[in-house]
Image (cartoon, rainbow, N blue to C red):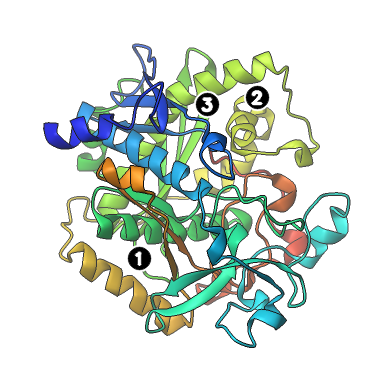
Amino acid sequence: MNYSFINKSLNAVSTELGILYHLVSSPSCAQDPKILGYGIWPCNTVYLGPEKFEGRSSGCGYDQEGCLFSTIWESAERYAPTFYDSKELVFASYNELSIEKEAIHPNQIALFHDKQFDSNNNQKITKLTPDLKISWVPTVDLVNNRKITYVPAQLIFLPFTKDNKWITYNTSTGLAAHINYHKAILNAIFECIERDSFVLTWMQKIAAPKIIISEDIQQYINERFTAKCEWHFFDITYDLEIPTVFGICFGEADYGSFVAVGSSTRATIGEALKKVILEIGQTAPYFRYVLGKKKEENWIPTNDFSKIKNFEDHSAFYLKRHDLWHVFDDWRNIVPSKHIDFHQKQELSDVEQILRCLRVFKTKGYNVLFKDITTPDIRQFGYYSIKIYIPQLIQMGGSYSWYFLGSQRLYTVPKQFGYTCNGFENLNHYPHPFP
């Protein structure tokens, strides 16, 4: 156990000066997975800067050290993007900015489909056009000779309320923090790929190859899950060629029947599958928390999916709406056919793996925009915090009405692999189940 780093990390926790006021161990029941978890109570960043640290952060692991580090660095990745240097910001339209500076054209940014604006014209999202004046911030394009490239600040910082016109709902995709700089970058890139692959799978209802649960995989699950569950894993590695897995788990808990999902991108498909199992494992106590909170709010999900406004709503939706579990049948009924090497070792270093990913994106003609958002206090705790934004990839949305459905990838990639490629009107209209 690395006591030096643990002690340094714990300096982040203080009721007076910490970026976190409290760390709270997640309660668990006897039948819960053998996974440790922490939740956090964040500080109020409005006393320090322009934005409020919003949302929840938590971490999990199979041991105290991994759980603690996971919690601190996820908290750091949510804390850091509430700060920005106003001197960096340029308020202009793309047409004005691009005269003197390199900037991402709005057509290259995968946000929303035109029909979403037609059906949600009473909501406060403005279509990003070349003549819309908003704040832009410089980033480094890692695939184009590290060229300084401007991108809308709303796509980097979380939240960002300085603009009068909102072009998106904030998302944490591509935020990462770690004690290792390169691991932070790699994890952020992996998350961008993972979210893109999941959205493709869910919205286009892709019947991806189902992974055969071998004895090794089953033993790995049994060692961590005392309760018997129904597991389904899928290889959702598409044109980006970086191993990605999607998992669905059906089970029983003290709060009733549940369905939990997870997805992960890693250097090997075995590592991605292990991460999916961990992600699903931490949902058991989280579902208990969400159901308690929704009960207090008297929240009842209806067939008006537009009322699903955040990821907590998505988490609770299928816990309450068992009558809609048929949406999972297409994946549930796939016959397992794919053998994987569950114990394959990563052969590349983190830097080599980053370069591998960048070569893939360069071949596709995509940008990989990097922003170091590490604050001085985070660095004192031994962490780095960064943002990776890949404008052509699909993000995962928390507001049902504003799922990110404007990407060309959503309507072209499935066809490359022989799957049905549905138009906007025929996309999966059920809410995704991601927590």
Between 351 and 410, the one nearer to me in the picture? 351
Q: Do the residues labelled 2 and 1 touch (CB within 8 Å)?
A: no
Between marks 3 and 1 in the image, the one whose residue lies nearer the viewer? 1
Separation of marks 2 and 3 at Cα, in angstroms: 9 Å
Quarter of the image with the N terminus in it: top left
Marks counted in the figure total: 3
Residue plotted at (70% across, 39% down): 309
Residue 54 appearing in the image: no
* Residue 95 versus residue 266 in the image, above or below: below
Between 81 and 308, the one nearer to me in the picture? 81
Residue 85 at x, y = what percent?
51, 58
Residue plotted at (26% across, 28% down): 224
Q: Mark 2 points at which residue?
A: 320
* Residue 183 versus residue 311 in the image, above or below: below
Q: Which structural element holds mark 3? A: strand
Residue plotted at (55% across, 73% down): 150
- Quadrant assignment, res 100: bottom right
Label number found at residue 155: none
Q: Mark 1 points at which residue?
A: 242
